[in-house]
């Protein structure tokens, strides 16, 4: 069983004493319901900014903002290019665009080539966020049917951030979290209910 396992590759700092400015989340097939569970658990006082990449079909309207807003106490937006990344706000990548973090902590949107057959790409978000937020970044990889996000999680950890993945046995498509575990780029492997509780208890940003 993977549940609540910690990676043996390095000593993991407790999230209870770890301050994050950003939580970056990547998901693909089977990830919407898990995202709804995680976002519903976040209190209105949740301090970190949240950025989400969900693999979407290009040129088809996305209803993720409405879906996530329905149960979230936090504002949920599809950001414009150049928009400032704000604490306590959920930023959802629009379909057909990579969503990146700029050095001044604003959003960049790109139509460059797909990465791992996906645009938006989880790797692109994780890697850009890691260079800006470093040890104040928590990267989370959920259900999905490919390995997008695995390289990005490696960058998150290399820059001092923490990496969580969903337990594969709870994922509708376990390939994505399993690939991260096999690559050894994971700090903790958590079931969605435990992940939700842990997120809700994150310390406020000072």
Image (tube, grey):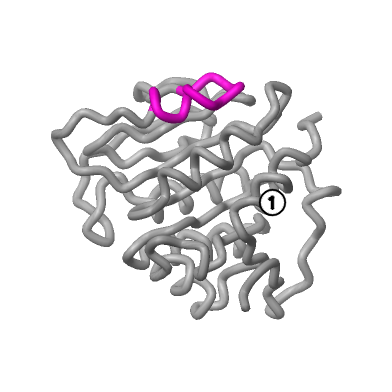
Find disc 1 in the rendering and name its residue: 135
x and y percentages locating residue 3 in the rendered image:
65, 69
Rendered position, 147 above or below 93: below
Q: In the picture, which quadrant includes the N terminus?
A: bottom right
Based on the displayed image, in which of its 4 quarters is residue 94 positioned? top left
**Residue at figure coordinates x 77%, y 42% from the top left:** 19
Rendered position, 195 above or below 102: below
x and y percentages locating residue 151 in the rendered image:
44, 65
In screen coordinates, is 139 left or right of 82?
Answer: right
Based on the displayed image, in which of its 4 quarters is residue 87 positioned? top right
Specify whether residue 74 is painted magenta. Answer: yes
Q: Report the front residue among 84 and 195.
A: 195
Q: How many marks?
A: 1
Which residue range is magenta in the image? 65-76
In screen coordinates, is 173 left or right of 13?
Answer: left
| Residue furthest out toward the left | 59
Rendered position, 18 above or below 5: above
x and y percentages locating residue 157 in the rendered image:
61, 62
Q: Residues within 10 Å of mark 1 (few under 14, many from 20)?
A: many
| Residue furthest out toward the right | 17
x and y percentages locating residue 193 in the rendered image:
64, 51
**Residue at figure coordinates x 81%, y 29% from the top left:** 206
**Residue at figure coordinates x 39%, y 23% from the top left:** 66
Q: Secondary structure at mark 1?
A: helix
Specify whether residue 55 is painted magenta. Answer: no
Q: Report the front residue among 145 and 71.
A: 71
């Amino acid at each position: 069983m993977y549940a609540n396992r910690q990676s043996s590759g390095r000593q993991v700092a407790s999230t209870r004493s770890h301050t994050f400015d950003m939580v970056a989340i990547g998901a693909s097939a089977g990830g919407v319901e898990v995202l709804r569970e995680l976002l519903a658990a976040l209190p209105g006082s949740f301090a970190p900014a949240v950025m989400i990449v969900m693999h979407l079909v290009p040129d088809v309207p996305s209803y993720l903002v409405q879906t996530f807003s329905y149960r979230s106490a936090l504002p949920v937006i599809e950001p414009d290019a150049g928009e400032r990344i704000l604490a306590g706000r959920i930023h959802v990548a629009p379909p057909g665009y990579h969503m990146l973090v700029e050095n001044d902590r604003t959003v960049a949107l790109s139509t460059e080539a797909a990465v791992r057959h996906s645009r938006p790409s989880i790797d692109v978000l994780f890697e850009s966020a890691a260079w800006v937020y470093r040890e104040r970044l928590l990267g989370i990889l959920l259900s999905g049917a490919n390995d997008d996000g695995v390289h990005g999680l490696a960058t998150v950890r290399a820059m001092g951030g923490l990496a969580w993945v969903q337990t594969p046995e709870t994922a509708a498509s376990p390939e994505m979290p399993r690939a991260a575990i096999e690559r050894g780029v994971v700090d903790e492997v958590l079931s969605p209910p435990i992940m939700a509780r842990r997120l809700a208890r994150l310390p406020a940003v000072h």
